[in-house]
Each structure stands twice: as C-alpha cells, then as structure tokens.
Amino acid sequence: MRFIVLFLFSFTWYSQAGAAEKMGSSQGALVVTEMASGLEQPWGLGFLPGGGFLVTLRDGELRHYQPDGSFNVVTGLPQVVASGQGGLLDVVVAQDFETTRTLFLSYTKRQNGGNGTVLASARLSADFTGLEHLRVLFEMKSPSRGSKHFGGRIVEARDGSLFLTLGERGDRDEAQSLLNHNGAIVRVHRDGSVPASNPFAARAGALPEIWSYGHRNPQGAALDARGQLWVVEHGAKGGDEVNRVEAGLNYGWPVIGYGRHYTGFRIGEGTHKPGMAQPEFYWDPSIAPSGLMIYSGKLWPAWRGDFFVGSLKFDMISRLEVQAGMMREVERLNSAQTGRVRDVREAPDGSIWFLSVDKGAVFRLAPK
Amino acid sequence: MRFIVLFLFSFTWYSQAGAAEKMGSSQGALVVTEMASGLEQPWGLGFLPGGGFLVTLRDGELRHYQPDGSFNVVTGLPQVVASGQGGLLDVVVAQDFETTRTLFLSYTKRQNGGNGTVLASARLSADFTGLEHLRVLFEMKSPSRGSKHFGGRIVEARDGSLFLTLGERGDRDEAQSLLNHNGAIVRVHRDGSVPASNPFAARAGALPEIWSYGHRNPQGAALDARGQLWVVEHGAKGGDEVNRVEAGLNYGWPVIGYGRHYTGFRIGEGTHKPGMAQPEFYWDPSIAPSGLMIYSGKLWPAWRGDFFVGSLKFDMISRLEVQAGMMREVERLNSAQTGRVRDVREAPDGSIWFLSVDKGAVFRLAPK
C-alpha cells in the first residue's frame, strides 16, 4: 500500500459563554445555532415544508417544531420497545408530503420471542398534533432477543420505494442468510408490497424484500445526486465502513471485514473475498458512524457531493470527498458543543443540521 | 480461506469419424452440429429473425448465413486494421432489427498515431448483401500503437443504449485514468450521443462515455435476466475475472488483481483495496475467457441463469453457477471438436452456439 498524504483539517474553537457558537472549517468559520434543546436521545430529523421540522426521541416521542422554535409532542405514535439501542428511530418526510401529509417511521417492536425493526407510514394531521392511519409496511423476520444492531435508517428512493437498513442484531452469522432480514438492507413500496425488481424477488429460498446483505449495523443512509444509495455502518474494531449499495450484493460481514472483532480475534476469512463487495472507505480507528448526508446545497459549493457522517465516538462530523477515484476523510468538524452526533441532514436552505446526543440538542451550521 | 469442495464435471467423448459429434454434460449427452465451417478467425456471432445468422471474421469479413447453410459475404464493411488481436470484432443484431435492419459492429480503426476500437451502426440491406448507412457511434480516445487488448464486445441494454468493452491496450496504468478510454466499459446511445445518466457525464476531468474502468481486457459481456451487465476479462496470470459491472465503479487493474503479472511480479498493491470492486469469480489457472452467455432458454431448465464462458486456452466452455451466494465453476464442456472458443451465444430456440477458432467453425449444442 502506497503511503497517502492525508490532509485532514480538525478545528476546535472555544467560544465565550453566552456568545454565538462558532466552528472552524476548511470553508471558513461556521455559525452554530441551537435550534432545539432538552432532547433525550434524539435519533432522527426531518424537515417539513414551510420551515418546521420533526425530531424523534428514542424513548418513543416525536416532536414537531414550528419555525419559531415552539414545539408540540405528536400523539398517536406506535408502541416501541425502548431498550438498549432500540426504540423510536428514524423519521422521513415523504417527497409528496404537501399533498399526502405522509411520514415514514422506523422503530423497534415487540415480536414473538423478541423484538425487531419495523417500517411504518402515517399521516401527520393538518394541525401537526397527531399521527393518523399508522400502517406497518415492513417487519423484520426472525426476531432476536438482543437489544443491539437494529439499523433503522430510512431512505425514500426517487421512484418512491423505501429502503430500510437493518443490523444483524448481534446474531453475526445471520447477516449472510437470505432467509432472514438480519444485516440486510430491504426495499418495499410505500404500500408495503415488494417491488418485482428487487434482486431476490423471484428467487426461491430468499426473502424478497432483501436489497443487499452481509451488513453489520448500518445506521446512516442517503442518496447521492445520481439517486445512488450509500450507507455508513458500524463495523468491527477499526472497520467502520462507507458502502455504495448495489442490488443483490453481499457486503461480506462476518466473512470479511477490515479491523478486528472487539474480542481481538481476526475476522472470518480476512479483508476480501471474490463475490463480496469492498467498502468505499473504512475508518481505523472506528468513529461509530451514525447519520449520513451527501451535500447538494448552495451554501458551500466546494462541499457539493461530499459525504458528512456523524460520529458517536469522537464528537464530530467527518467529511469525506472523492479524490482521484478514492474516497478520503479530509476534515472533522467539531466544536466544544458538538457532543456525540446521531444524525446529520441538509436543510432545504442548504444549511447543515445535526443532532447531538450529549447536548440533547438540534444544531444548525451556516456560513458566518 | 475455507476449503471448498468443487464438483467439476469435465467430459470428453470421442466420436467415430463421420458420425454425429456428441459431447457429455451434467444434463446428459449433447449433440454437436457444425453450422458453418471454413472460417478464418471467427470472432462474433449474431442471430437474425427467421433462422439466419451473421459471423464476423477478424480479417474484416462479415458473413450472412441462410437457414439452409448457404452464405454470402456482406459488402460495405468499414476498413479495419487486422493486426495482432485487432480487426473486425463483434456483431450485434439490434432488438428492433425486424423494423430497422440495424446492426452494431466493433472493429479496430487506424487513428492518428495508432489504432483504437470503434463502435458503429449500419443497416443490413433487405437482401442481406450489403451494409448501408454505416455510422461511427464511438471511437476510443488516446490511440495506442500496440495491437493487443482491444476488448470489443458489444451489449445492447434493454433501454437501447449500447455498452462496448475496451481493453487497456497494453498501456496498463491508463486503465485507472478517466481521461482516456483504455480499460473502460463505455455506454452511448445508438445515435452516438452520451446518456446524461452515465456516471461521469457531469464530472469535469473525466470522459463522459465511461461506465466503469480499471479493466484489463474484457472480451465477453452479457446481460442477465434482470438486465444487469456482466463481463469476463483476461486478467493477469491466474487472475481471469468475472465482473458484475456497476456504473462508476473501478475494477482495480493494475492496482489490484488476483494472480501475478506474466513476468512473475506481484500485482500493484495486491488482491484488494477499498473503493475497488472485487471480481465475482476468478480462474486460477487462467482460461483466457472470450465470449460470455447467460442462459435463459427452454432446452436445459437446470442451466437457466448459469454463465457459459468460452476458453481460448483450454478448448472448452466453462459453466459457472451461483451456489449459496458464491459463483463457482461447476462444469467444463468440451469434445474432440471444440478447439479454442471465441464466442458463446444462446440461439432464439434455446440451443447453445459457439465459435471455434481452431476448427474455423460455428457449432450448435442441443440435447440428444
């Protein structure tokens, strides 16, 4: 392996108490504004037309914020199993929300003999106070008793179908099976039916919802400008990954992976194997990647197409870019206020928003 | 790497002189019928509606065969550079041939300072005697003086766009460049324009025709039942590959590869690297793979979805199937008559046809 000079920016600015928070970056100082606070374990963030937004709290609460900062707790939420890494997870505002009022939610549901990740749709009432017509679109098969590796990130594809990421629930070897949903990314239509174009839709001995498999615990997912799906996933120690997700591919866990098991043992057969996809990038040491956002906005033209990934371990947002065909981490955005980052999103105005677990807050980044 | 028990059939039946040739297979005996002979370096084969077919000869000749076995040499062919591995290469009969009479051809053309692979369309006259309206749709940039690794296989995608495989012309490092077409698979519309959905269409510093890159010399290509593009390519010694081709991906040559350079040296950085695609399968020892066909016919239901790859080295057709998510070579079809195999195709009736270089013949395989 050739030696690669990695030019990595990392800025930390300590602001005076009470003053507006600032954060350094390769694109100059960023203004950090707190948009919401007092949030216990925020997980997902969705923007509404007109300037409002939604935040999920893992214990099962969905909050609606008005543009003026006031909020209400939305009623009619499903019963969730808030235990370990599970609970109410992601929220996505449908592309056609203005006409349909549709939201998509992921959460952990009690199932026979355990619990599993579920994808549901619902309508948000006209006054933003309650959910109506809650409907389960997909429910993970093979419930597991454990309370980790639920995945849970939702992406609405351009054609309106829905991707949901699923972790292997700690049942490592099940990530290689097509007979359960552990460690898979699944794709369903918004009425819950299975697209005939899914790669295993017509294959005997495979669950038809599976889009890709061999994942460990993908908690971040986004589309790029071409509509291509990407995920970030918690890997083994020294092996957190960025993956470009293609229909039908096997991402290798636990047969291959970079890094080592947290027990110190070598992973399966090593780092690579024919027929198993390589990551586009891996972090060593691991950063515990959460939400993924691929920037497309106007505020920082130089960042268009770059990947922004929240870190639950290093209290920062990792920025990756592609240079000469290779993905590289080039910057880590953080300040004294960042804390553990659970989600990163681009707002309609091109500003970058993130959820801080430690601060229990939603922050907005904008140019100075 | 775990030890894998590979159940590989290999049959050779010697028939009596003058008797109908037979070939053993896992699906019982196959009848081998010579459909055309006296062919010097046949390269590509295309089926016409009504039972006729076309064969290209590398020196620049296109032959049209009637269902009764008689043939004529088609006139109006472009000037080709028949030198080394170059010359007239593939022929594809357009999906809409019955209404448009369109064919697609690939060949080697003299260019400033060298030669390069070209994709052209033409109409076959109503009496099958001549080409009309020959039009170059794509011409490889960066001509090379060498006479090897031209690629040259054409695939018509379901949407009517055209894929053309290109080797790195022996200029190994150029396979990693997006500024030339060496070692790339390109995609153009049938009017020669570049699809806006090509992965590099909007990227500065990249040729917009490129679909994938980092290939060595792909000479076989086909679509599977889902419309997914696959190629087989001549790799390094012990590293011939089957690749599932995705838009924008880097297939790694010469940075990574299985096997070794023919000089005995280790390849680039080894067998794998993040951001570079792994093959689905590789042959060690190399078989020198030529044409690729993915079976979809009625004659051997057990073979549906299997890959059939011609070998220029071992005088056989390699059959691969996917077992438990892994591609494996499970059978080698050959007989005393096979010789070096340049192309394998499925005929409209579900029989398997192949071109033998040594025998200068077109053969048809059918159940006994």
Image: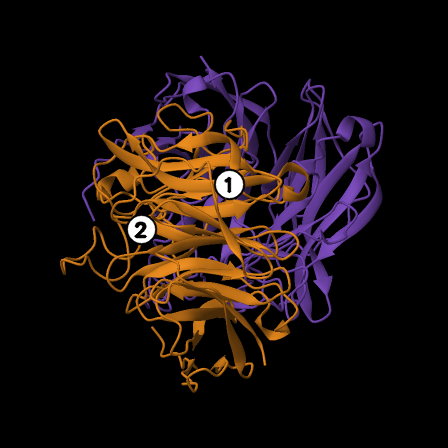
Chain colours: A purple, B orange
Q: Which residue is mark 1?
A: B104
Q: Residue B9 at what x, y percent from top left?
A: 44, 82
- Residue displayed at 42% across by 26% down: B203
Residue at far top of view: A368
Position of the C terminus of chain B, as image quadrant, is bottom right
Query: In the displayed structure, does residue A266 sit left or right of residue A111?
Result: left
Amino acid under disc 2: Lys
Residue B260 placement: quadrant: bottom left
Q: Residue B206 at what x, y percent from top left?
A: 37, 28
Q: Which residue is mark 2?
A: B273
Amino acid under disc 1: Phe
Q: Is A74 drawn above or below residue A179 in the view shown?
A: above
Q: Is A120 drawn above or below residue A35 in the view shown?
A: below
Say which chain tag 1 marks: B
- Residue displayed at 36% across by 61% down: B289
Q: Residue A280 at what x, y percent from top left?
A: 39, 45
- Residue displayed at 65% across by 42% down: B96
Query: In the displayed structure, does residue A225 sit left or right of residue B212?
Result: right
Q: Residue B253 at what x, y percent from top left?
A: 29, 48
Q: Are marks 1 and 2 in contact (CB under 8 Å)?
A: no
Q: Is A8 drawn above or below residue A83 in the view shown?
A: above
Observer-side mark, 1 or 2, equals 1
Q: Nearer the viewer, residue A164 or A50?
A: A164
Cα separation, mark 1 vs mark 2, equals 36 Å
Residue A75 placement: quadrant: top right
